Amino acid sequence: MNGVRAERGDGAGESLSFLIGLGRGAAGAMLFGIPMLMTMELWQLGFYIERWRLFLLLIANIPLLILLAHRIGFERTSTVAEACRDATIAYGLGIVISAAVLIMLGDIKPHMPLSEILGKIAIQSVPASIGALLGRSQLGGQAGKDEHEEDEEEGGAVPDEISTSYSRELFLMAVGALFLNLNVAPTEEIILIAYKMTPWHALGTICVSIAIMHGFVYAVAFKGTHEISEETPRWHAFFRFTLPGYMVAMLISLYVLWTFGRLDDTAPPQMLMSAIVLSFPGAIGAAAARLIL
Amino acid sequence: MTTTANKRHREVKEPHWIEWATGMISALVVVATIALVAYEAWTYADMQPEFSIAITERRQTEGGYRIAFDIANKATATAAAVTVRGEILDGSKIVEDADVTFDYVPAESKSSGAILFSQDPGVREIRVRAVGFIEP
């Protein structure tokens, strides 16, 4: 809403609301970033992660933030330029907050090599920047939101929107899965669980993940629960949303595991096992994202 | 697609063909995954880890000698805390030994490591073997 308010309003009010927005972003970065900022494995990953994988993660985060900002961002941005601005601010906030918290926790000290310091901050900045964006939207106020609510009613008049909003739906699931995956993937527990499980456990996990995903969105009546119209058979939504959602969660899991080097020198059955384990939180994250965002 | 009105999401009645295509592909992927895991479950045998070690490099380093090796686990069971001992043998006498511990050697996978000796083994025999592990 910054842009809109700037047109109407006085400079002081504008900068005040911008500062409040920054504060919300910082709060969001903290809220969503703390579990990772206090995870030992992520500190270690900061210096041993392969640099080009880290680079890829950092680059991939940019379009992700822009798309996310466009969808939910700070004050429901309407133009691409505004989405880019919000994404940049969120990324910046993510980096600053990560650095500040890591310094406070004594995890970054002046005598450390630059590459180690950079790596630690960079890897944390990804979840923190997503958190900053979410913080701005989820903790944000409601002022002036209503007029934009109208625009948010997708579909209807514009037929081109159909596939866009379906891909958007998948994108939101990917963000949700990515976020929860980043929380748990770096920990040793994920591979330990994969080693402990027999294939029977894995089969159970797949079924439970899919069931939870479907149940979260369609059956359990949370706020934002998706309704299926009376005439539509229930399995339609299962095929069109839940199964693709699980596939998205699976792909994101594989990507995150690969980024953190958990798939190196591992046989395909073991890779699949870890991906199934990680898809469990991923599926919950994906389902939650559909409801919340 | 989903229409959002008054904070409620409603799936539209006439979905785009792309949604069905994605759904079908996903269904295939999920079914394939389940089939693969089911196959593993079916053929799953309670095996014990089996190691084989191959020395990949011998190199003089600053103040010592490095023996790099790969440890492969052929079984379908993962081993944790695998201790590998390297020994320099002169005849039957052990001249020097050194240990290294792997956190995990996953099932049907390979891990790499190295043992550092203080002396050049020269022509003497080097023996590298796994001496123990725990179940994860």
Image (cartoon, rainbow, N blue to C red):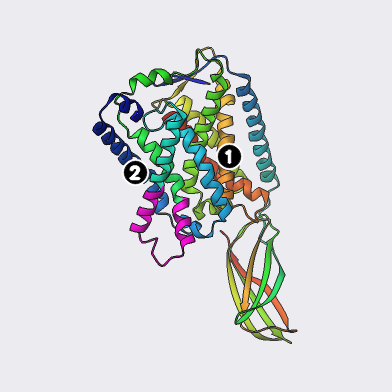
Residue pointed to by mark 1: A250
Residue A106: % across, % down: 36, 61
Q: Residues within 10 Å of mark 2 (few under 14, many from 20)?
A: many
Q: Can you tell which mark lies on residue A286? A: none
Residue found at x 63% / y 71%: B114
Residue found at x 34% / y 30%: A2
Residue B38 visible from this viewpoint:
yes
Amino acid identity at mark 2: Ala
Residue pointed to by mark 2: A26
Residue closer to the observer: A76 or A290: A76
Quadrant housing the N terminus of chain A: top left
Mark 2 or 1: in front is 2
Range covered by the magenta-colored residues: A95-123
Asked if the magenta segment contains residue A114, the reply would be yes
Dot 2 falls on which chain?
A
Residue found at x 31% / y 28%: A6
Residue closer to the observer: B132 or A82: A82
Residue B127: % across, % down: 70, 77
